[in-house]
Image (cartoon, rainbow, N blue to C red):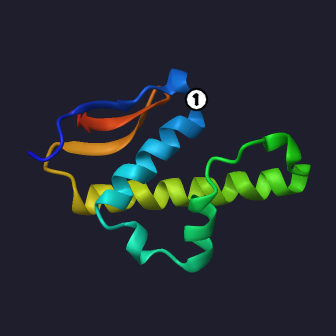
Amino acid sequence: MKYDPGCYADGFQGDDYCCKKLFDIAKSEGWYDKLEADEKAFLFDFPPEDYDEYAEEDLEMHSLYLESLVEDAIDYLNEHCSEKRFYWGFEDGDFGYWVQCE
């Protein structure tokens, strides 16, 4: 097994930390190579230094874009880097590789 089951990013570190950890793992598995140029640019600047610089509508678009990339990265990991009875995802705010309940 390449990855041990468990928590890879504690939610107490914050959403950006957990997403960054997810993206780093997915990148190491080839996910980044399939992304479009605008998606790569978004990830290059993630997380932003200061969310206060965003206008409200820009912050909403940022959140939607981030949510889409998170779902895509998780799907990629589950399709390419997950064994039976395990899945990548978020549980109680933590990102990890979890054992599926029956």
The residue nearer to you, when weighing 64 against 26, is 26
Query: Residue placed farthest to the right in the image?
Result: 55
Residue at 53% across, 21% down:
12
Residue at 86% across, 40% down:
52
Query: Residue placed farthest to the left in the image?
Result: 1
Count residues near mark 1 (Cα–Cα under 10 Å), then give few for <14, some for 14-19, many for 20+: few
Label 1 sits on a secondary structure element that is loop
The residue nearer to you, when weighing 9 against 87, is 9
Residue 50 drawn at (x, y percent): 78, 41
In which quadrant is the C terminus drawn?
top left
Residue 40 vertical position relative to residue 2 in the rendered view, above or below: below
Residue 23 vertical position relative to residue 5 in the rendered view, above or below: below
Residue 98 drawn at (x, y percent): 27, 35
In which quadrant of the rendered view does residue 4 lie? top left
Residue 59 drawn at (x, y percent): 80, 51
Identify residue type, mark 1.
Answer: Gly
Which residue carries the number 1 mark?
Answer: 14
In which quadrant is the N terminus drawn?
top left
